Image (tube, rainbow, N blue to C red):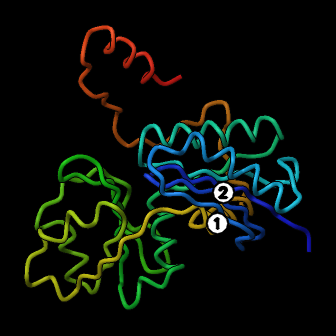
Amino acid sequence: MEHEFILLIETAAEACSVALSDRGRIVVEKYTDIPKSHASAIAVFIESIFKETGISAVDLSAVAVSEGPGSYTGLRVGVSCAKGLCYGADIPLIAVNTLEAIAQCAIDNALVKDASYIVPMIDARRMEVYTATFTRECKMTSPSTALVLAPESFSRELSEGKVLFTGNGAEKFMNLIPEESRPNVLFAPQLPHASGLRVRAHKSLQKKEFENCAYFEPFYLKDFIAGKPKNLLAGMFQMQSAKPR
């Protein structure tokens, strides 16, 4: 059987991972949860995977990247690397929603159990999260959104059956859930991993659903807001470096 290698890159959260899949099966994966290590780790991971498997970028059928929502800096690192590989090897680029990757990881790790819905949450600011709703088969039923959590959030899903809340933002919701809804709540921490991109990436490859490398940008969901500069010079530098290229 002919190989269909896809390099999978995930840098949307605090962890960073790179994996290689072949027809939807993970061949090898590299992962680190060391904070702010995306830029230094990603090239090392890719080189290590190529060395271990004996393949190179030109042997890939595509590169898939976690498109967001998530960390502004992390997303730019991952997307820039993916686009560079695609340009250099003249191979297609595939984008996978980060929330879908988290939901797929939860399914892969048998966290769903008897839940009817999966609600991955990525921590934003204060009581806000990036979130969407998925079925237990990883079909998105509500679009990605930036949501300020409240006790009534996801009341419809909780009234219909058990719901798995996961991702690094889910813990913020736990203390808000009304007592009458708690029997239907399942909670499990789950960060996005590159392996969670493999199912969607394989489907996109079969359907030839590719991104335009020249114009593709990460799915930030919200505009980037830089921290308050300590002085005017620092502020000028910060705004310049935050401007999309």
Q: Residue at the location (36% across, 62% down)?
A: 132
* Amino acid type shown at disc 2: Leu
Q: Residue at the location (72% across, 50% down)?
A: 46
Q: Secondary structure at mark 2?
A: strand
Of mark 2 and mark 1, the one earlier in the sequence is: 2
Q: Residue at the location (19% across, 66% down)?
A: 173
Label ID, residue 198 = 1
Judge by depth and name the residue closer to the eye, 137 or 234. 234
Query: What residue is disc 2 on?
Result: 8
On the rendered structure, is 239 left or right of 43? left
Residue extending furthest toward the right: 1
Find residue 195 and report its image quarter.
bottom right
Quadrant holding the C terminus: top right
Q: Residue at the location (33% across, 8% down)?
A: 233
Please say if the residues under marks 2 and 1 sit with CB atoms less than 8 Å apart.
Answer: yes
186 in relation to 233, above or below: below
89 in relation to 201, above or below: above
